[in-house]
């Protein structure tokens, strides 16, 4: 049974649509980017790939669609090959589409723009929310905490090589709401640090400093960006050291389950005591407004996906089953012959 790691390589965010796909393809010699394949085809190709891998192929990276959470592709690192299916509306050049298709795609893109605008509005609310804590955080204490943690987890460790860094998302704002694969990504990590805090208390900066220190010592890093604000980091995994650190606050709040799990409480270490209580009403309003705006953004994602599902149904009805099966077999052959 091959080990699988599930994650996202793109996101609908407050910065619009953001893709980190290329960061994950540095070692791939052959990677197929499919465009507009019906989900049924993708599922069958995925199953075909799984049926042909052997234990010698090692780890499999399973890519998920940021709109639906469904499987969208696979990377086989040891074979240096893989594929991903991108929806038709991700293609900037849709001039080849027929008039009816263009009407679908225009409507989808319009609603995606509305979703991104609402995510951006939600970030504006979040920025105001953060200011409460920024004004009440002792960043010297936070920096001292960061340096203590770096010394604790890295010690004198230094590897004689240039570090490799890959950028991904562990979650996404899907049509079903917030979704993440933190448990899956960290299942084989021996030591997990749960970073607790509040908006604006420096959790992302903390993670960036840890990753920078590791990279300077030749330690490979998996960096997982925030799907809401891709400029912010939510998790760093150092597999060579068997450890990870991640932002364990809503909407991806987790608590220790293993004896080796450890909490790093930024709020306790660096925020003025009583800040939550002093600004309780104001913080409650920010939280409520933020959730409502994100919910509105999600409704536009849902509308876009309903339209796209209708389009994909039309596409699948135009293609004979035999032709679909032959195409899937050819693609699967390419992935294994190429390596």
Image (tube, rainbow, N blue to C red):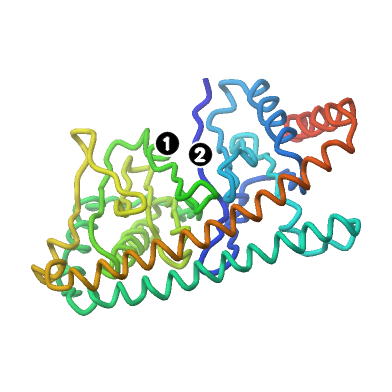
Q: Which quadrant would residue 213 be assigned to in this image?
A: bottom left
Q: Residue at x 37, y 53 (%)?
A: 235
How far across and down, in percent of the image, does residue 149 sit? Answer: 20, 56
Is residue 170 depicted above or below 120 in this figure? above
Q: In the rendered view, does 222 fall on the left or right side of 62? A: left
Which comes before the other along the chain, label 2 or label 1? Answer: 2
Q: Is residue 246 left or right of 331 when viewed as pictured?
A: left
- Tags 2 and 1 touching, CB below 8 Å: yes
Q: Quadrant of the C terminus?
A: top right
Helix, strand or loop for disc 2 = strand
Mark 1 falls on what kind of element?
helix
Task: Give the x, y percent position of residue 296.
Answer: 50, 62
Q: Is residue 280 above or below residue 32?
A: below
Q: Relative to 190, does residue 10 appear above or below in the rendering?
A: below
Residue for point 42% across, 75% down: 124
Q: Residues within 10 Å of mark 1 (few under 14, many from 20)?
A: some
Q: Residues within 10 Å of mark 2 (few under 14, many from 20)?
A: many
Q: Residue placed at 35% from the left, 49% from the top? A: 252
Residue 46, image x, y percentages: 67, 31
Calculate the distance from the C-alpha at mark 2 to the C-alpha at mark 1: 7 Å
Q: Residue furthest left?
A: 273
Q: Which residue is mark 2?
A: 6
Which residue position holds label 1? 184
Image height check: is 102 above or below 272? above
């Amino acid at each position: 049974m091959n080990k699988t790691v599930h994650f996202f390589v793109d996101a609908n965010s407050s910065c619009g649509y953001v893709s980190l796909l290329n960061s994950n393809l540095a070692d791939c010699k052959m990677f197929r980017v499919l465009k507009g394949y019906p989900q049924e085809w993708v599922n069958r190709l995925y199953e075909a790939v799984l049926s042909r891998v052997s234990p010698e192929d090692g780890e499999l990276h399973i890519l998920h669609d940021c709109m639906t959470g469904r499987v969208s592709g696979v990377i086989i690192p040891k074979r240096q090959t893989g594929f991903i299916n991108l929806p038709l509306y991700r293609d900037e050049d849709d001039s080849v589409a027929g008039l009816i298709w263009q009407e679908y795609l225009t409507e989808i893109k319009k609603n995606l723009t509305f979703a991104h605008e609402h995510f951006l509005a939600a970030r504006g609310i979040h920025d105001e929310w953060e200011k409460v804590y920024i004004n009440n955080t002792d960043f010297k204490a936070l920096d001292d905490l960061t340096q203590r943690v770096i010394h604790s987890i890295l010690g004198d460790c230094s590897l004689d090589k240039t570090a490799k860094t890959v950028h991904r998302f562990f979650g996404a704002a899907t049509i079903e709401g917030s979704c993440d694969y933190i448990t899956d990504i960290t299942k084989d990590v021996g030591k997990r640090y749960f970073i607790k805090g509040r908006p604006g208390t420096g959790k992302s900066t903390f993670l960036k400093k840890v990753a920078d220190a590791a990279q300077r010592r030749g330690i490979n890093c998996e960096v997982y960006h925030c799907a809401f604000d891709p400029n912010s980091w939510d998790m760093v995994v150092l597999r060579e050291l068997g450890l990870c650190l991640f932002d364990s606050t809503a909407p991806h709040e987790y608590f220790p389950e293993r004896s080796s799990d450890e909490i790093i409480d930024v709020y306790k270490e660096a925020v003025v005591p009583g800040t939550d209580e002093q600004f309780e009403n104001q913080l409650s309003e920010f939280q409520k407004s933020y959730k409502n705006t994100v919910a509105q953004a999600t409704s536009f994602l849902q509308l876009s996906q309903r339209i796209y599902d209708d389009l994909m149904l039309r596409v699948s009805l135009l293609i004979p089953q035999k032709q679909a099966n032959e195409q899937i077999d050819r693609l699967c052959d390419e992935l294994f012959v190429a390596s």
